[in-house]
Image (cartoon, rainbow, N blue to C red):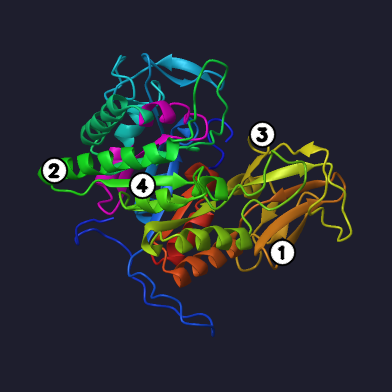
Amino acid sequence: MKPRIPTLFFLRSSASLRFSLGFLVACGCASPPPAPAEYEIVGYYAGWTAPKFPPTPANIDAAALTVLNYAFLDICWDGRHGHPASGGLAPCIDAGGRPSTPPDGSLVLGNAALDPANLAALRELAKANPGLRLVGSVGGWTWSNRFSDMAASPAARRAFVESTVAFVRHHAFDGIDLDWEYPGDIGVPCPAGHTCQRPEDKRNFVALARELRAALDAAGAPDRKRYLFTIAAGADDKFVYDPADSARWLSELAASLDWINVMTYDYHGSWSNVSGMNAPFDKVDATLSRYLEIGVPARKLTLGLPFYGKGWAGCPPGPAGDGLRQSCAGMARGEEDSTFTFAYLAREGYLSPDALGEHTVAGRGFARHWDRAARVPYLYNPADGVFITYDDEASIRAKLAYLRRKGLRGAMFWELHADRDRTLGGVVARGLQR
């Protein structure tokens, strides 16, 4: 999905503060669908960033968001949670922050030291911003290893559903987001003796979603609210199609969801030594067009925006002299591993504002380039062969114009700490008139 541990989305009462935007027609081609009257802006807050970036009004502009997704919660099994091969296992902690041995499949907190205080701080943030809704996100790249076990068992699904309802009520949250990466194609492999994926994962996901939607609706009636239920979804065909090469499961899944946060990024990354674009426009368009073609309504899709990039080192200049699509020596060192957040690029002098306040001025020996087809910038330093792919104000605006033309539900981004100077988030808020 995004740089996550450690590497790393509708209905609301008419009183909610949301977006109003007139219909824009920006091309002379066939008329696009009418733009929605309201847009979602979904921002992830990574709980583990709290020691350096606590969830306070000083750090989070809640007025610029409609939904804040708290990442990540986990699934308990045999009294423990986590990934045995990535970060290890830890005792399960219940919704109140106490040690617990709940039924297998139960939703639990992910970080006993940080989550209780983070969740309390987010509740205070929401109290001061009635237009903000809080959603707990489960799983992520590292903690998706128990989804398959949970979804495959009616008893474990029931435990997950019941504990999810208990969580949103206990913490006065507004919903849940499932970040299963990925059904039938797990991101972080399991060690020997563990099962993290099954051919029937996607069918089981549909069953889980129906049961969870029914339970959230049943809880919402006496609570006088609609609890949100969203997922984070992959951008490639491996996610969209099941083993029978059918996408029907995904349209069935969407029927239970308020919307799908499509992770339209990570098209290129640290798994390849060839320099390339993290979130090029042509790939984003291909992904969203595929979702629409298989029958997912535009109003059930948000476009994912990366507030981070990736870097490679030892990249030859190539025929264009810009280091693009070159075989490199390895990954460059960024803020964390090969990740270069936008805030890091700006604070460390890789990028500086021009006369209009846009970050188009490169520093530290880098030259800024713009790919007209991909509609994204990139940096290249010929002295050491470092190539950095990222998104900036201009590329974010291009993607916002696209989502308006397509009539999508809104935008999602990963993540708040990566934009701690609020530069790109401000572009999104202004672009969607928040």
Packing grade of label 2 (10 A; few <14, some 14-19, many >=20) is few
Residue corresponding to mark 3? 337
- The residue at the far bottom in this view is 28
Residue under the point 52% across and 46% down: 239
- Note whether 382 is above or below 21 in the view shown: above
Mark toward the start of the polypeptide (3 vs 4): 4
Which percent across, then down, holds residue 245? Answer: 52, 49
- Based on the picture, tell me whether residue 170 belongs to the magenta stretch: no
CB contact under 8 Å: marks 3 and 2: no
**Label ID, residue 223:** 2
Distance Cα–Cα, label 3 vs label 2: 44 Å
Residue corresponding to mark 1? 371
Distance Cα–Cα, label 4 vs label 2: 19 Å
Mark toward the start of the polypeptide (3 vs 2): 2
Choose mark 1 or mark 4, whichever is in front: 4
Mark toward the start of the polypeptide (4 vs 2): 2
**Label ID, residue 300:** none
Element carrying mark 1: strand
Position of 350 with respect to 137 (left or right) is: right
The answer to whether residue 173 is visible is no
- Magenta highlight range: 122-151
Packing grade of label 3 (10 A; few <14, some 14-19, many >=20) is some
What residue type is disc 1 on? Asp
